[in-house]
Image (cartoon, rainbow, N blue to C red):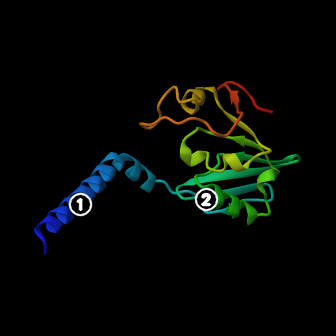
Amino acid sequence: MNKILKIVLLSTGALILALIIFFVAGNWKYIKATRQLHPADTQKINDSVFCVKDSYVNAFLFKTPAGYLMIDGGMREDKVLDEMKSFGIEAGDVHTLLLTHSDRDHIGVTGALENAAVWMHRDEEQMVTGETEKMGSSYTWKYGDYKLFDSDQVLD
């Protein structure tokens, strides 16, 4: 084998190995934490409560006279929407999305819920505006308007 080709292949292999090690080391806490999570399977809990499993998180839907209240939106829009459809629930049926927090694994379906008012705790706003980093990165909220609530506030 040509000496230059050998050097290029070894260098490329070493670079790929270094990137893999860097990625695993940088995400070790995340990987370890998510392996400890055991979400419930997708299921109809009763006639008014539905659970959707998406990877290592759950989203919950509660039937109301006006449609559905959803708590958290899972990770992947397509997965959550497919699971909802298995119960006969469409994205347009959800009138309210209540986010326990704004991590990416809880907001996955947000963009598809066009009829839903999105609520989150006031302390989360600094994360969705990018003012404060969360888990080592910042992002900008791309899902339109949202409403804020305080710890002592009762939502009706």
Q: Position of residue 135 (x, y in %)?
A: 44, 38
Report whether 92 appears left or right of 131.
right
Residue 151: horizontal and vertical position, in percent?
Answer: 64, 26
Q: Nearer the viewer, residue 30 or 77?
A: 77
Point out the image quarter for the C terminus.
top right
Q: Residues within 10 Å of mark 1 (few under 14, many from 20)?
A: few
Residue occupying image coordinates x 57% and y 35%: 140
- The residue sitting at 66% across, 50% down in the picture is 109
Q: What is the spatial separation of the Cα atoms under label 1 and label 2, in whole angstroms?
A: 39 Å
Task: Indicate the secondary structure of the residue bearing disc 2.
Answer: strand
Q: Which residue is mark 2?
A: 53
Q: Secondary structure at mark 1?
A: helix
- Residue appearing at x 68%, y 46% in the figure: 111
> Mark 1 highlights which residue?
12
10 Å crowding of disc 2: few (<14), some (14-19), many (20+)? many
Judge by depth and name the residue closer to the eye, 7 or 128: 7
